[in-house]
Image: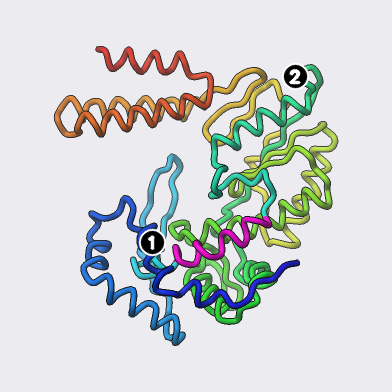
């Protein structure tokens, strides 16, 4: 296994911290805390660099709030200084670990994403069933309370197999241990904050252990994953066998468990919900919930536009983004219905 040394000063260099700031500030420049950090940007970056260089840096506390995206999520937000550091860490470490990930891991990776994941599911079903002429099953699972359940010690063990730079290990420990779930004792911390950019990287690193087990030990050909949701396309008996093996691996190696009410095993032609879409033979549709949410948002924004609370340019940008969602499925009728609403 290839290991990495001497990258600490790459991460904490003022050049990388400034680059991280440029990445972080996109879409946030009107927020009060971001404006305050920007007001004395040079001094703030210099101070952060020195704290890291002399190891006097300590990750700050989090503010928390809930969002509906669409399901209710508990977000924990770090201060601007810490979030800039998260970007700096991500900039250097993500390319190192991304090379280790399997091709069909689609979450938070350049050139991947939800739409590609849905297309690959369609492709896998089509290939496994010989162009929809043979029978097959689709197994979908997700992890119960994934982000809240990630074990800090296991995560650090996985990271440190690759990252041998002791200074970077100190920094990663500082970030990882800055947050933990309330329900666990201090000696065995669990949990990652959903609001951290580093949490996206750590989630992929953690779940890559499952990916490698599935691909290299179980030898499952038709497998894909998006964060903690994963799908297998295979015969009925094999799916049940794989399910038992995966359940044991998750418990023994990662201290995770499958969500008992979100294990779905069905014949391929019944359609499988995945990442906001429903995949059938020969076509892909928006999920009913996704469709209702899109119509609701379009109607709301159209009302804002009609009442001069939104510019024509902003409304058109939003509309085109929704049309972009429809372009990845058989959405002609939905697009036509949207245009009819706008003509009224």
Q: What's the distance in space between the residues labelled 1 and 2, CA to CA?
A: 46 Å
Say whether residue 157 is visible.
Answer: no
Could you classify mark 1 by the number of other residues whose Cα lies within 10 Å: few (under 14), some (14-19), or many (20 or more)?
Answer: some
In the structure shown, which secondary structural element does the residue marked by tag 2 occupy? loop
Q: In this rendering, which labeled residue sits more in front, label 1 or label 2?
A: 2
122 to 175, vertically: above or below: above
**Magenta segment includes 96:** yes
Name the image quarter holding the C terminus: top left
Place of residue 271 in the rendered image (x, y in percent of width and height, measured from the top left):
64, 24
Type of secondary structure dominating the magenta stretch? helix
239 to 295, vertically: above or below: below
Dot 1 or dot 2, earlier in sequence = 1
The residue closer to the viewer here, 54 or 326, is: 54
Q: Quadrant of residue 29?
A: bottom left
Q: Are marks 1 and 2 in contact (CB under 8 Å)?
A: no
At 39% from the left edge and 83% from the top edge, which residue is drawn?
A: 50
Q: Quadrant of residue 285?
A: top right
Place of residue 27 in the rendered image (x, y in percent of width and height, measured from the top left):
31, 50
Place of residue 97 in the rendered image (x, y in percent of width and height, measured from the top left):
63, 60
Residues shaded magenta: 86-100
In the structure shown, which secondary structural element does the residue marked by tag 1 occupy? strand
**Magenta segment includes 115:** no
Snapshot colouring: rainbow
- Label placed on residue 226: none
84 to 118, vertically: above or below: below
Residue at which label 1 appears: 77
Could you classify mark 2 by the number of other residues whose Cα lies within 10 Å: few (under 14), some (14-19), or many (20 or more)?
Answer: some
Relative to 9, is 154 on the left or the right?
Answer: right
- Label placed on residue 132: 2
Relative to 99, is 249 on the left or the right?
Answer: right
At 53% from the left edge and 23% from the top edge, which residue is drawn?
A: 329
């Amino acid at each position: 296994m290839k290991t990495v040394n001497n990258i600490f000063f790459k991460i904490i260099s003022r050049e990388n911290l400034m680059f991280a700031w440029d990445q972080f500030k996109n879409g946030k420049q009107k927020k009060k805390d971001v404006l305050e950090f920007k007001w004395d940007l040079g001094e703030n970056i210099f101070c952060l660099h020195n704290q890291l260089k002399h190891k006097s840096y300590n990750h700050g506390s989090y503010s928390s709030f809930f969002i509906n995206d669409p399901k209710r999520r508990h977000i924990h937000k770090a201060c601007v200084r810490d979030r800039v550091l998260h970007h700096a860490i991500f900039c250097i470490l993500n390319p190192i670990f991304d090379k280790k990930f399997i091709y069909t891991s689609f979450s938070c990776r350049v050139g991947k994403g939800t739409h590609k994941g849905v297309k690959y599911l369609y492709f896998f079903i089509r290939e496994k069933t010989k162009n929809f002429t043979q029978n097959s099953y689709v197994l979908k699972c997700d992890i119960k309370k994934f982000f809240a359940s990630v074990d800090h010690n296991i995560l650090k063990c996985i990271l440190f197999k690759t990252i041998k730079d002791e200074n970077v290990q100190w920094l990663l420990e500082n970030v990882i241990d800055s947050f933990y779930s309330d329900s666990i004792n201090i000696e065995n911390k669990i949990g990652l904050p959903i609001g951290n950019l580093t949490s996206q990287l750590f989630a992929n690193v953690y779940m890559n252990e499952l990916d490698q087990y599935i691909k290299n030990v179980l030898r499952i050909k038709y497998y894909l994953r998006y964060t903690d949701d994963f799908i297998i396309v295979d015969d009925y008996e094999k799916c049940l066998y794989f399910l038992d093996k995966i359940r044991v691996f998750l418990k023994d190696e990662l201290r995770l468990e499958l969500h008992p009410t979100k294990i779905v095993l069905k014949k391929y032609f019944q359609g499988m919900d995945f990442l906001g879409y429903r995949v059938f033979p020969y076509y892909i549709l928006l999920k009913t919930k996704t469709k209702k949410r899109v119509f609701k948002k379009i109607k709301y924004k159209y009302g804002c536009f009609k009442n001069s609370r939104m510019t024509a340019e902003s409304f058109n940008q939003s509309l085109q983004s929704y049309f972009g969602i429809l372009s990845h499925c058989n959405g002609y009728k939905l697009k036509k219905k949207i245009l009819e609403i706008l003509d009224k």
